[in-house]
Every structure is written in C-alpha cells, then in structure tokens.
Amino acid sequence: MNTLSAFERFTALPENLQFQALEYIEFLFSKYVNIKSEDVTEKSVNTEELTPDLKIFLENRLNDYRKNPDKVMLPEEMERLLLQKFGYAV
C-alpha cells in the first residue's frame, strides 16, 4: 500500500475512527521506533523494565478485575461517558 492510498483510506474514516487510528499509529511508532532493521522480531523490540510503582499499580488493577470481572466497561461505553462529560474522548 502506498502513502497516498493509505491517506485516502484514512481520510475516508469518520473523525472518531481517525483519532483511534492515530493513537494506534503512535503506539506502533513508540514501540518500534528504536528498531534498526526492517525485520521486526520479538528480540528486536526495545523492552524496558517496568518501574516498581507501575508493577504494583498493574497488579492492583489485575486483582480488581479478577475480583469483579463484571464491572468491566467496554471502550465504546467509556468513550460515550467521556464525550457526555467532557465533550471529547481521550
């Protein structure tokens, strides 16, 4: 796929999906920006160690989920609530 056709497809998306696509592109860029070769393998990905505070935070979130798996909010529902409260979704 060339740049022009990718851009045409991107601009044909609704604005809220364009925002999601940009977030995904940013995620991919941040994950693979330090890769020197075009061959992307698991070994070539820059893996940084999590901080102890972040590990504790993630463990707590996972434990909360395990205790209350029914209290999960779907991304669409979260987006609706953010739009309703703030006028935009993050």
Image (tube, rainbow, N blue to C red):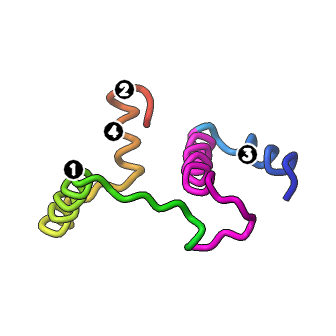
Q: Please tell me how crowded label 2 is: few (under 14), some (14-19), or many (20+) other residues with Cα within 10 Å.
A: few
Decide which of tag 1 and tag 2 comes sooner along the chain. 1
Decide which of tag 1 and tag 3 comes sooner along the chain. 3
Q: Nearer the viewer, mark 3 or mark 4?
A: 3
Q: Quadrant of the C terminus?
A: top left
Count the numbered circles shown. Answer: 4
Name the residue: 40% across, 33% down: 83
Q: Position of residue 16 (x, y in %)?
A: 56, 40
As displayed, is residue 67 above or below residue 77? below
Which image quarter: residue 65?
A: bottom left
Q: Is residue 15 left or right of residue 9?
A: left
Query: What is the magenta range?
Result: 16-42
Identify the amino acid type marked 4: Leu
Point out which mark residue 10 bears: 3
Tell me how far mark 4 sits from mark 2, CA to CA.
8 Å
Identify the amino acid type marked 2: Phe
Point out which mark residue 53 bears: 1
Tell me how far mark 4 sits from mark 1, CA to CA.
28 Å
Tell me how far mark 3 sits from mark 4, CA to CA.
25 Å
Q: Position of residue 37 (x, y in %)?
A: 73, 64
Point out which mark residue 86 bears: 2
Decide which of tag 3 and tag 2 comes sooner along the chain. 3
Task: Give the residue number, with chain letter if any, for mark 4.
Answer: 81
Q: Is residue 72 left or right of residue 24?
A: left
Name the residue: 43% across, 58% down: 48
Identify the amino acid type marked 1: Asp
Q: Position of residue 27 (x, y in %)?
A: 54, 51
Q: Please tell me how crowded label 1 is: few (under 14), some (14-19), or many (20+) other residues with Cα within 10 Å.
A: few
